[in-house]
């Protein structure tokens, strides 16, 4: 199926871009950044690599009338988590809750408008951290940046820090493009949860949600970045996440796709520090006409680094999925251990998924492996459960949940499967996971600890 985007030049005009830039008070470097990104938006294809253009699954995207300046009232908000930083992005703007006790200890959160006022090197540093956009939708997201923040954790701040971030789509034709820069000091401990939802009755037209994350971890730092992606089926979403690890640092990227019309995820991690360790764990549940396109890129630079990418998707109806995992091991990256696992389960004849693992090994003293499969549900397992009194639908559902739990149980977040299964149940039953659907679908208090597969992966205290 070839990618196609109807009338993409009508999505955004130069005049609308200038109006957005003026309204946000862009300094000159930012205004130029937008113009450059817009030019790339006009020139680039949806999928830059010709090898993958037949797998893009981005047909039907039409963001005509997109409005990055759409405004509206604040959405209803759940009670705060005591001791946690909370950041809210909605049609009213961005709001921040930073407990005074954390601010007194050097935790700094600087919002987009404040960064623009700083000017000079602060702006240039905030815009750096990613390679230039390589495809049309990523370029569009860069041109429309209208929310963002910079999080700084000082060296030696070893108390576990929880950041709870919400992005709520509530207006037709809305565009939320969030950019965040995270600096984790040496020996810091961080858990960020990015939770994306839609309000009821806001799905009259396609909307855009874009998320760009640039993370730098100091020596010995530990960080978990967990995304729960559950907007309604009119959301077109682009995720772009990049990280660089210090010596002995540990990072976990977690991404759980439940909602949205078209979703693209691009993760790129440089394991630069000796002894650093990165897990990239992703799950997808696709139904109706949804599609998910994921790409994971590990570059091993330091010695004795460990990287693990595990992706699993379940697809039914006419849903589509693609996952690509690339591991590059540089010539000096001795004693590297790398693993890429990409598996998909198809529950209907109309569903499709493609899995493409790639290893690029430039050093001999390494261990690198991969596994991949795309298959229907095992009829023998279904028959076994039917003999135990289940009907077929119940049996397929249990098998599918177990298939995804393989990834969730390897997460360093304790009980993640139990947190996410109510949301998965809603999607399985054909319901949207709507904001404030009694109760709010937010993640509760969470702790980061070891798992059976990685018992040493734990923080010393609970992250709330």
Image (cartoon, rainbow, N blue to C red):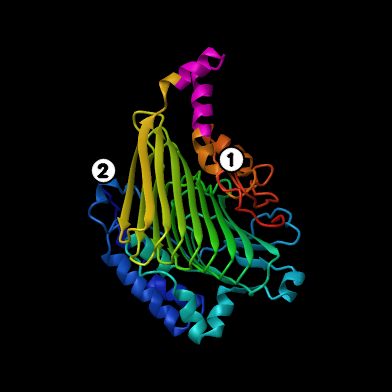
Provide residue 39's location: percent of width, then percent of height.
31, 71
Q: Residue at x 28, y 63 (%)?
A: 44
User: Looking at the picture, does residue 31 appear above or below residue 245?
Assistant: below
Q: Which label was assigned to residue 1? A: 2
Residue 140's spot in the image, x, y percent? 38, 64
Q: Residue furthest front?
A: 365
Give 369 or 37, whichever is nearer the viewer: 369
Residues shaded magenta: 381-402
Q: Which residue is mark 1?
A: 423
The answer, for residue 62, to whether it is visible in the render is no
Q: In terms of secondary structure, where does tag 2 sit?
A: loop
Q: Nearer the viewer, residue 296 or 25?
A: 296
At numbered mark 1, what does the secondary structure look like: helix, strand or loop?
helix
* 354 in relation to 428, above or below: below
Quadrant of image for the C terminus: bottom right
Q: In the displayed structure, does residue 278 sit left or right of residue 456?
A: left
Whether 382 is among the magenta residues is: yes
Q: Residues within 10 Å of mark 2 (few under 14, many from 20)?
A: few
- Percent across and percent down for residue 415 are 64, 43
Q: Quadrant of residue 156?
A: bottom right
Q: Residue at x 47, y 44 (%)?
A: 233
Which quarter of the picture shows residue 186? bottom right
């Amino acid at each position: 199926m070839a990618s196609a985007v109807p009338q993409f030049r009508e999505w955004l005009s130069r005049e609308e871009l200038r109006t957005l830039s003026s309204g946000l008070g862009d300094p000159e470097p930012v205004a130029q950044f937008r113009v450059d990104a817009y030019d790339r938006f006009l020139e680039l294809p949806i999928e830059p690599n010709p090898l993958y253009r037949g797998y893009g699954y981005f047909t039907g995207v039409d963001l005509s009338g997109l409005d990055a300046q759409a405004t509206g009232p604040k959405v209803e908000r759940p009670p705060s988590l005591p001791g946690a930083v909370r950041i809210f992005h909605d049609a009213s703007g961005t709001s921040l809750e930073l407990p005074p006790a954390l601010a007194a200890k050097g935790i700094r959160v600087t919002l987009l408008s404040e960064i623009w006022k700083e000017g000079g090197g602060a702006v240039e540093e905030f815009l750096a951290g990613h390679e230039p956009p390589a495809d049309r939708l990523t370029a569009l997201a860069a041109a429309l940046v209208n929310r963002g923040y910079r999080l700084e954790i000082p060296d030696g701040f070893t108390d576990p820090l929880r950041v709870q971030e919400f992005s709520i789509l509530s207006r037709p034709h809305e565009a939320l493009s969030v950019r965040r820069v995270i600096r984790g000091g040496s020996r810091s401990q961080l858990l960020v949860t990015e939770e994306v939802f839609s309000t009821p009755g806001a799905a009259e037209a396609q909307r855009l949600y874009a998320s760009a994350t640039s993370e730098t971890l100091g020596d010995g730092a530990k960080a978990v970045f967990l995304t729960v992606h559950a907007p309604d089926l009119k959301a077109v979403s682009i995720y772009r996440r990049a990280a660089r690890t210090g010596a002995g640092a540990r990072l976990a990227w977690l991404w759980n796709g439940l909602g949205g019309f078209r979703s693209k995820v691009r993760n790129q991690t440089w394991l630069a520090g000796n002894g650093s360790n990165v897990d990239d764990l992703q799950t997808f549940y696709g139904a109706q006409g949804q599609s998910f396109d994921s790409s994971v890129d590990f570059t091993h630079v330091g010695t004795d680094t460990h990287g693990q990418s595990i992706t699993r998707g379940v697809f039914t109806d006419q849903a589509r999925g693609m996952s690509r995992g690339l591991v590059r091991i540089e010539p000096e990256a001795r004693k590297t251990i790398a693993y890429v696992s990409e598996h998909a389960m198809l529950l209907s004849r109309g569903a499709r998924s493609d899995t493409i693992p790639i290893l690029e090994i430039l050093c001999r003293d390494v261990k690198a492996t991969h596994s991949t499969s795309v298959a229907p549900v095992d009829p023998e397992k279904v028959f076994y459960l039917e003999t135990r009194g289940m009907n077929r639908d119940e049996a397929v559902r249990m098998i599918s949940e177990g298939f995804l739990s393989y990834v969730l149980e390897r997460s360093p977040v304790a009980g993640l499967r139990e947190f996410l299964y109510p949301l998965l149940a809603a999607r399985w039953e054909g319901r949207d996971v709507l904001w404030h659907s009694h109760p709010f679908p937010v993640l509760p208090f969470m702790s980061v600890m070891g798992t059976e597969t990685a018992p040493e992966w734990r923080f010393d205290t609970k992250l709330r």
